[in-house]
Image: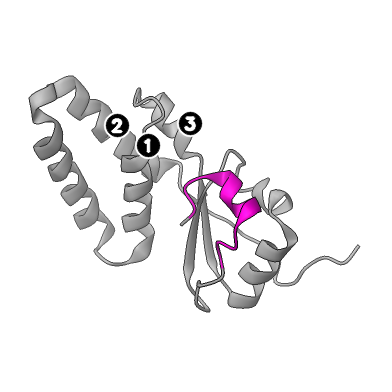
Amino acid sequence: ACHQYNYIERYDMLKKVRKGGTFLLNSPFSKDEIWEKLPKKAQEQIIEKEVNFYVIDATKVAQDAKLGRRTNTILQTCFFAISGILPKDDAIKRIKDAIVKSYSHKGDTVIQMNFNGVDKAIENLFKVDYPKKLQVL
């Protein structure tokens, strides 16, 4: 995963992704825009490794859920939803249980805002369809 979009431009975020692996990118660009915005090297690696590539604008989701710039819960939800470590519904239940445990002292409003963030994360997580080979111009 890459939680800060500008890291994809500065670092080799896909270096250790295995063939057929999964990569999650927090991006201000939609699933339809992202491919053209990626560095060529990242595009090459995604194609070569046949990566399951997902994108979310976690910053926007967090702001819409009234969580400010706190994207941790959003991105954690996405990770568990696409990783296959746990069944998606079980993972979401566990995340919500952890939210109650962590934030119950802050009140129901904070808990509900975080629950909303979890639900909105799933709604705004998109798999990116990309070309099977780079377009040569």
Q: Residue furthest bottom?
A: 19
- Give residue 120's mark: 1
Name which residue lies at 32% across and 34% down: 117
- From the image, tell me which residue sits under label 2: 116
Q: Is residue 108 above or below residue 62?
A: above
- From the image, tell me which residue sits under label 3: 60
Label 2 CA crowd tier, 10 Å (few <14, some 14–19, many 20+): some
Image quarter of residue 74: top left
Q: CA distance from mark 3 to mark 2?
A: 13 Å
Q: CA distance from mark 2 to mark 1?
A: 6 Å
Q: Do residues under tags 2 and 1 come within 8 Å of each other at their CB atoms?
A: yes
**Residue 48 x %, y %:** 65, 76
Q: Residue furthest front?
A: 10
Q: Which residues are magenta?
A: 2-14
- Identify residue type, mark 2: Asn
Q: CA distance from mark 1 to mark 3?
A: 10 Å
